[in-house]
Amino acid sequence: MKLFQVFMQDLKKFFKQPMLIITFVAVACVPILYSGFLLKGTWDPYGKLENLPIAVVNLDKGATYQGEPMNVGKEFVDELKKNPKFAWKFVTQEEAENGMINNHYYAMITIPQNFSTDAASLTNDHPNQSTIEYESNSYYNFIAGQISENATKELQNQLSDNLTEAYTRSIFNQFSKLSNGLQTAGDGATDLDKGAVQLRDGLTVVTKNLSTLSLGALKLQESIKLLHKGSTQLAKGTADLSKGAHDLANGTQKLASAGHQLEKGASDAKTGSDALVKGIQSSKQGADQLTAGLTSSLEGSKQLESGLTISHASSKELAEGTAQVAGGLQQLKTTHPELALDPAFQKLLAASLAVSTGATKLSEGQSQLLSGSQTLSAGQKQLLTGSQKLSRGNSQLLQGATKLQVGQQQLASGLHQYNTKFADIVTGSQKLAQGARQANTGASKLNTGLGQLLAGSGSLGTGTQKLTTGAHKLEVGASKLSNGSGELASKLNDAADRTADFKADDQTIKMLSTPVSIQANDDRHISAYGYGIAPYFISLALFAGSLVFTTVFSARTSTSQKDASGWKLFVSKTLTFGLMSFAQAMIVSTLLVYVLGLQVQNIPLFYCFTALVAFTFMFFCQAMVTLFDQVGRFIILLVMIFQLASSAGTFPYELLPGWAKVLHPWLPMTYSIRGFRDVISSANYGDLQGNINHLLIFLIIFLILTIGYFYFNRPKPKRKPARRLVKV
């Protein structure tokens, strides 16, 4: 129990001072400021998007599609009015622009005048893509701009699906008309079959003479029909090819223009990086000169302080001597009253008193000068330290700016090569578009010629009828005509039945307009943003609480025993810091679970892991302050900054810069954030065990560092010498 003696005495003294108890409780509640208020303030920002104002400007004038009025812009606005996801503000263009300038809106959506006209141009030779203009006010708030941009993309997809559904419905209407036409043609073919039978019966004489010619004309006509059908498909395909090539040419031209703008921006960035390097070089030279000047000034102040110390001692001795002389003269005057009548003695006495007073004031003035010199020396030391840090920081900035300058040069060169080569692509796409138009023109002419040829084959059949030189030939021709017309009637009626059976209900149209749907799996989904950011805020809260505690309570000395041994001090300080970390962990866990309503996978495990994280952070702060005192607190602050940047608490690890990825596995907050994610959301206890092991390793290392300080820097308590027994 002697090992815990210092701790128990410190604890008793602690509970006797109400102010220390209040301070202890206040420091224990410090993490609430981070974990409680920050987490509550950012718990579910995406659940309040209905308060986010977005301006909507509808300039669409409408159009006519297949003889029906069409206003896609108005339909889009009506859909927005039904959508409560954002605070849509339907205003004029001038009001929207003023609102963006004055930061009244986070984004602006503009539906242009020709929006419906472009949407209705699907059946034109050169259809135009409908465009919605979107502008985010990222200067006002970047995150709000990103959210509104994603929402606008969703609305764009929804509007595209609606337009595709309308186009599909129009195509199905054409299928219905085609079915009616095929049915009419089938009926006509049936009548033709009946007439052919009657002709065959009446022309039995000429049948044999026209059999061969009629058979050849029929085959030729069927072949020409197939060829004409193929040419029709070819013309349609070349038209689609021409459209695609035209769109490709327009796209490459826009891409080339964007490439030139990007190249200009890279050139401007390179100029800025060159100026940045020059400015940092000038700043570094000034910092080096300042350091040299402060070093010389510090030496001078030290010499001044030394001289004033000697002068102050001398003036003090002078004041004491003059005081003694004046006192001696006063005693002499008392002993010899007759001297009071002596004018010379009176002058001597007055002069000695004046000299004594002046010497005393001189001593006091030099004492003030000595104090001012010491204050000046301390201030110059602090200035020299700051100047040296500034010089080192400028050196690091110069290295980074130099790398940035080299990267900007490489980027500008690469973009220049890209724009040079892309010009050939633009030329090729234009030639491709021209060739596709020529192919479409040729296919159209081929289709027209085959139509004329098909008409000529019909005329050939009519001519064979005029060759009525024999009744047997006409009979054969009529028989084949009867067979062909019957088959034609059957095929046409079958085609009419098939097209009539094609379903054109809403479900089929919906499937064709939106063939693919996405089904979200919510197994690993969290219900609020607070669950995702909670591990980061909890770790930050516990680390900040540990840092604050080191500024309030001493890490090296005991309040009850000034000469305590190193082991007793280590036990006392470690238990004190551990008690504080345990109190902070319990307060934070209780606040999050039972006040803020944070749902965790396992409450006891959450309490235990929070305590482990608090112990690790607290013992790290204890080790740094114990080893380095005030410099240790600065090291703690640096480590906290590095942890906030490299622990992947907000952005994924893959998005971190290179230096942050290097620091990521070597800092304890990395594993505290991972562990909190496991115990709060994923319940991945295998990964949690690995994070616990890492934190335990950090904790042991920090305790060993603290033990080392007390072992090597604190003397062991002296033992009383044993009494020796002397035989008499």
Image (cartoon, rainbow, N blue to C red):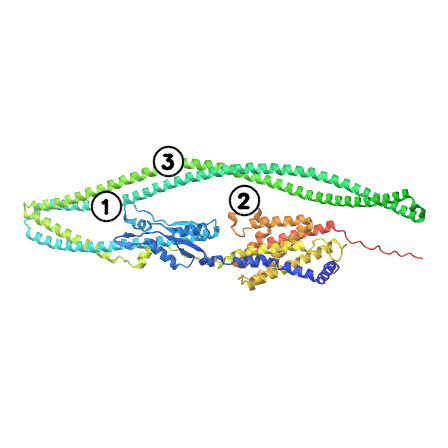
Mark 2, secondary structure of its residue:
helix
Q: How far across and down, in percent of the image, does residue 553 sit?
A: 68, 55
Label count reads 3
> Gap between marks 3 and 1, in whole Å?
34 Å
Q: Identify the residue position indicated by label 3 in the image.
A: 424
> Residue 658: which disc?
2
> Gap between marks 2 and 3, in whole Å?
37 Å
Given the image, on which type of amino acid does mark 1 rest? Thr
Taking the spot 64% from the left edge, 48% from the top edge, the residue there is 634
Q: Looking at the picture, does residue 406 appear above or below residue 698? A: above
Given the image, on which type of amino acid does mark 3 rest? Asp
- Left or right of 485? Residue 581 is right
Label 2 close to label 1 by CB (< 8 Å): no
Q: How far across and down, in percent of the image, does residue 213 sit?
A: 11, 44
Tell us which disc is closer to us: 2 or 1.
2
Q: Identify the residue position indicated by label 1 in the image.
A: 232
Mark 1, secondary structure of its residue:
helix
Mark 1 is surrounded, within 10 Å at the Cα level, by few (under 14), some (14 to 19) or many (20 or more) other residues, namely some
* Of 498 and 656, the residue lying toward us: 656
Given the image, on which type of amino acid does mark 2 rest? Gly
Quadrant where the N terminus is found in the figure? bottom right
Q: Looking at the picture, does residue 256 appear above or below residue 19? A: above
Mark 3, secondary structure of its residue:
helix
Image quarter of residue 366: top right
Taking the spot 59% from the left edge, 56% from the top edge, the residue there is 541
* Of 717 and 364, the residue lying toward us: 364
Q: Earlier in the sequence, mark 2 or mark 3?
A: 3
* Of 281 and 443, the residue lying toward us: 281
